[in-house]
Image (tube, grey):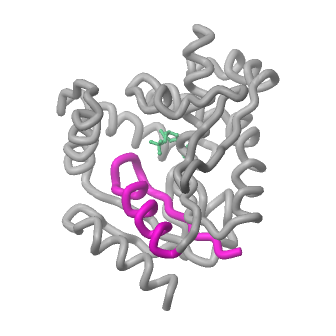
Amino acid sequence: MINVAIDGPAGAGKSTVAKAAAKKLGFIYVDTGALYRTVGVNALRKGIDPKDAEEVKATLDDIDVSLGFVDGSQHVFLNGEDVSEEIRLPASSMAASAVSAIPEVREFLLSLQRDIAKKNNCLMDGRDIGTVILPDAQYKFFFTASAEIRADRRCKELKEKGIPADYETVLAEIKERDYNDSHRETAPLKQADDAVLIDSSYMTIEEAVDKIVSYIKG
Ligand code: DC
């Protein structure tokens, strides 16, 4: 199977670019952030503080998180319930960032990610795909863009979905998540030594897609 690891901070354009590149290549696109978001949503629903490692760990015993693909697009299920919409709410983003720092949560989601990669040609999007989940992926990319540009993109995305968004709040949240994601002890966000760096700040989506596809097609 051909595995492509795509890592980078929130809003660097990974998901849009990876989705389009996957379509061109005929690979599946796997958004691993959805898995952490689902664990976060479960904690919120149970009234648990997502930062409380002990409480969150205890929830892992009775949850089943799975991914399904409908017409090529990914859906995520929490105990069989499709939570693909709920995981996109801003509160779910913060909860995901908090639970993703808990080593047991990362361990809980590891085999699910590796199994998908074993069975499918895929572009897998996350934070630690090239470093931890698929260290032997044939292709690795690390996306980056300035926090301001990422906040601007996130606001537009949220507004398109009818979710009210304030630029300064979104920017502050992005900076907080960047800090959390790159400073946690387990699998922090960092570029793999053998990953190709793509700064998407001033690139169009098409340019970034072409760059990835041309690496893979050779
Ligand atoms: O990509 P995203 O914004 O949906 O990710 C949500 C959170 O999950 C993000 O704050 C970091 C975390 N995450 C992670 O730690 N490892 C991954 N492979 C994917 C996401």
Q: Is residue 13 left or right of residue 82?
A: left
61 in relation to 180, above or below? above
- Expressed as whole percent of the image width and height from the top left, the position of residue 26 reads 55, 72
193 in relation to 131, above or below? below
Q: Residue at x 67, y 64 (%)?
A: 134
Q: Residue at x 55, y 56 (%)?
A: 72
Where is residue 3, by image quadrant?
Answer: bottom right
Residue at the outermost right position = 61
| Residue situated in front as seen by the camera: 123 or 166 | 123
| Residue situated in front as seen by the camera: 73 or 195 | 73
Where is residue 60, by image quadrant?
Answer: top right
34 in relation to 7, above or below? above
Residue at the outermost top position = 47
The reply to whether residue 200 is visible in this rendering is yes
Q: Residue at x 22, y 33 (%)?
A: 159
Q: Residue at x 44, y 79 (%)?
A: 213
- Expressed as whole percent of the image width and height from the top left, the position of residue 37 reads 54, 33
Q: Quadrant of the N terminus?
A: bottom right
| Residue situated in front as seen by the camera: 215 or 8 | 215
Q: Is residue 213 left or right of residue 57?
A: left
* Residue range (magenta): 1-25
Check residue 14 for magenta coloring: yes
Check residue 46 for magenta coloring: no
- Expressed as whole percent of the image width and height from the top left, the position of residue 123 reads 55, 64
163 in relation to 136, above or below? above
For the image shown, how many numbered marks are present on the structure? 0
Q: Is residue 146 left or right of residue 126?
A: left
Residue at the outermost front position = 71
The reply to whether residue 126 is visible in this rendering is no
- Expressed as whole percent of the image width and height from the top left, the position of residue 135 reads 67, 67
